[in-house]
Image (cartoon, helix red, strand yellow):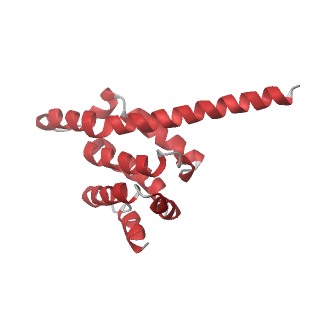
Amino acid sequence: EAVHTFMVTLLDSKRAEMCFSACGVLTNLALDPPNRVCLALEGASAKLVDCLRDFGPADWQLAGQACQALWNLIGHGSDKLLHTEEREVLLEILTVYSDEEEALKWTHNEDEEDFHKACWESEFLPVAQKLIKVYLVEREGKDMQQRSLGWDLNL
């Protein structure tokens, strides 16, 4: 459990390379269901969302790694590990970052533009789209459930 705490603490680092390393370790730890619970208790999901928000547009490899860690933590039906508000923030970030024009406007160096785009397309976008899909399906299911409850109550 000390490893979980340490890795989650590293996500608070204001240094991209520390966050990247921590995301990589968390991606692997989150493959194991018992670890998911420990990581949830440490607040890993919310900190990964913060990491994604803070570093995403400048580093699509890090953004992709953060998304993969989130996917391993919450993409297998364990989405209750994120509070509703955190899920909405994550969905908003992923939606903005998945817009190619929005995502690639952060490239400051023309020489790195192709690399930046390639990282966005291969490292970030596939995992981000999986996360978006999970949350949109979940949201749609809740909306349908609430509507059906409303209809049942009006009988």
Quadrant the N terminus occupies: bottom left
Tell which residue pokes out farthest to the bottom in this image.
2
Residue ID at (62%, 32%): 141
Decide if residue 87 is on the left or right side of residue 120: right
What x and y, as percent, mark residue 53? 39, 46
Q: Is residue 78 visible?
A: yes
Residue 137 figure quarter: top right
Q: Is residue 105 visible?
A: no
- The front one of 28 and 110 is 28
Quadrant the C terminus occupies: top right
- 140 versus 91 height, above or below: above
Decide if residue 142 is on the left or right side of residue 114: right
Residue ID at (50%, 43%): 89
What x and y, as percent, mark residue 126? 33, 35
Query: Number of numbered discs present?
Result: 0
Residue ID at (66%, 31%): 143
What x and y, as percent, mark residue 16? 27, 55
- 31 versus 125 height, above or below: below
Tell which residue pokes out farthest to the right in this image.
155
What x and y, as percent, mark residue 142? 65, 34
Residue 154 figure quarter: top right
Tell which residue pokes out farthest to the left in this image.
111
- 105 versus 15 height, above or below: above
Residue ID at (41%, 74%): 2
- The front one of 56 and 8 is 8
